[in-house]
Image (tube, rainbow, N blue to C red):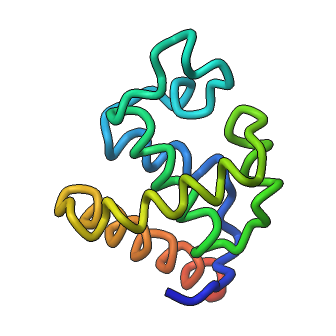
Amino acid sequence: MSLARFSPVRISEVQLAVAEACGIKMADMVAHDAERYGLRKRSIAYPRHLAMWLCRHIIGVPYTEIGSKFGGRDHSTVIHGIRNCEKFCKDNVRYSGIRDEMIERFKKMEKNHASI
C-alpha cells in the first residue's frame, strides 16, 4: 500500500483501536521493557507490529516518532516490526482482517473530519 496521510488520526487512537481489536492492554503494546514482562510474545508483538504498520502506512508517521510512541523503540525496530506485519498479514486471516478493518475505520474518520 502506498503511504497516505489520513489526519486527524493520532498514534494513540491507532494503538487503542488495535489493542481493543486484538484483546490486549494498550499498556502492554507500548511497554518498553518487553523481555522483562514477557511482552515479546506473539500475542503482544503482532498487534504492536500491526499498530506500527498502520501508523506508518495510514497516517504517515516517521519511524522515529512511531518508535518513541511505542516505548522508546529505535527506528530500526519499527522497520523490523512493519516488515513482520507485512509477512504475517499475508499468512494470518485474523490480523489481515483487523488491518483492513482499521484502514476503513481511519478512512471514515478522515471523511467525517473533512465534511465538518
Work out whether residue 83 or residue 17 is closer to the camera in this orientation and state it.
83
* Residue at the extreme left of the image, as rendered: 93
Q: Residue at x 42, y 45 (%)?
A: 47
Horizontally, is 76 left or right of 58 in the view? Answer: right
The correct choice, above or below, for 75 with respect to 72 in the image is below
**Residue 67 placed where, x, y %?**
74, 47
The correct choice, above or below, for 53 with respect to 6 in the image is above
Horizontally, is 68 left or right of 10 in the view? Answer: right
Horizontally, is 47 left or right of 57 in the view? Answer: left
The correct choice, above or below, for 93 with respect to 46 in the image is below
Work out whether residue 8 or residue 115 is closer to the camera in this orientation and state it.
8
Q: Residue at x 45, y 16 (%)?
A: 38
Q: Residue at x 79, y 66 (%)?
A: 62
**Residue 12 placed where, x, y %?**
65, 47
**Residue 35 placed where, x, y %?**
55, 17
Q: Residue at x 31, y 65 (%)?
A: 89
Count of all numbered marks drawn on residues in the image: 0
**Residue 57 placed where, x, y %?**
59, 75
Instruction: Locate the C terminus by quadrant.
Output: bottom right
* Residue at the extreme top of the image, as rendered: 36
Work out whether residue 111 or residue 50 is closer to the camera in this orientation and state it.
50
State which quadrant residue 100 falls in: bottom left
State which quadrant residue 36 falls in: top right
